[in-house]
Amino acid sequence: MKELIALLALMLVPATASAHHGGVTLAFGPGSPIETSSPLTLPEGAFVTGVRAEQVEWRRVHAPEDKSSFTFLNANFSYGFTPALMGTFIVPYYVKRTEGNGSNAGLSDVKLQFTYGFHHDPATGFSRNTEKDSAMSMESLGDRTWLTVSAMASIPTGDHNEALNDGTLDPGMQTGFGAPSYTLGIAAARAFGPLTMNAELSTDIFTERDNFQFGSEVRGNLAGVYELYGNDNLFVSRVDGILELNYLHLERDRENGVGLEGTGGDILYLSPGIRFSLPSLQNANLGILVKLPVARSLNEEQLQQGAEGLEKFRLITALTLYF
């Protein structure tokens, strides 16, 4: 039971500047990243709920139409149907602000995700997760590699026709997409004593609406998480240090089937963070991470103010409770 109290922070993959994606990650003992998905499913009948906030501050050229800052808020609810199958429901709320042309705010597109968990042992090969395969055994089986595959779909519940003060309809300033999107991903992790390495690869595919289509996205994440401190008898029972590399490839947005200028490119982020476990507060887990763009190659960069890669920073916080 002690390990269960220590486990399970559920966090969303952050929303981007245009709210192009979302997902979940689970924390498991000393090995939980914040941006990178963690490859564990919940025990059968377990329930995790959480809130996540991401604040994005944009570099500006001091024009009224400049995007100044975005705030992404997410509530998420995950349930373990079996030890190998987890479902997650995500409710996002977005606020998008400009320098002097108003702001848009409201519910975004809700999302439903299913995650299938399995693992690999050198002696037995690949096996699906059973009731014995959870975060309780993660720390004791250092030669085991944990894996998940996941699929997610969004339902277009957000507003995608909200004008700014000057009457323009900017797709990147909408809180919703107006059409379903789909995400496929795979994640893996392995523990090496107090260090856990996590890796994730995913793709987001957006469907067309009104002759407009957001560009597909590919993400590759690598995270190292190190247990800095642990004492089960204290209010803060564990502190983990986190360092992540987050790669994002963006295809061009398309209108009437033609790729648009000032869209698409490649970005690499360096993301340090920290995670606190507070078991006496309903098994709470608090994560904080700063995401910094360190390299980029954007198409027509001078036209991409308010796009991924041109942030000052992204500050992500996530608080989760395990039941």
Image: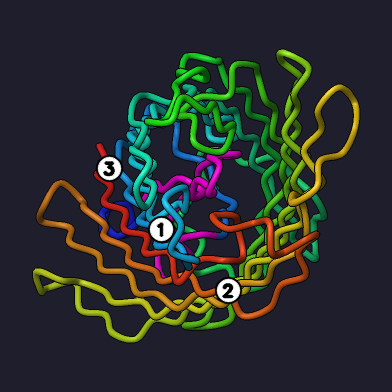
Q: In which quarter of the image is residue 154?
A: top right
**Residue 293 - label:** 2
Principal SS element in the magenta part? loop
Gap between marks 2 and 3 measured at Cα: 32 Å
> Which SS class for mark 2?
strand
The residue beneath circle 3 is 322
Q: In which quarter of the image is residue 266?
A: bottom right
Residue 3 locus on image (x, y percent): 33, 59
- Nearest to the eye among marks 2 and 3: give it: 2
What amino acid is labelled 3 in the image? Tyr
Part of the protein shown in magenta: 8-35
| Residue 136 visible in the snapshot | yes
Q: Residue furthest bottom?
A: 228
What amino acid is labelled 1 in the image? Val
> Which SS class for mark 3?
strand
How did the renderer colour the structure? Answer: rainbow
Q: In this picture, is 198 found above or below 179?
A: below
Camera-nearest residue between 6 and 214: 214
Residue 127 locus on image (x, y percent): 74, 44
Left/right of residue 208 with respect to residue 139 in the rendered view: right
The residue beneath circle 1 is 56
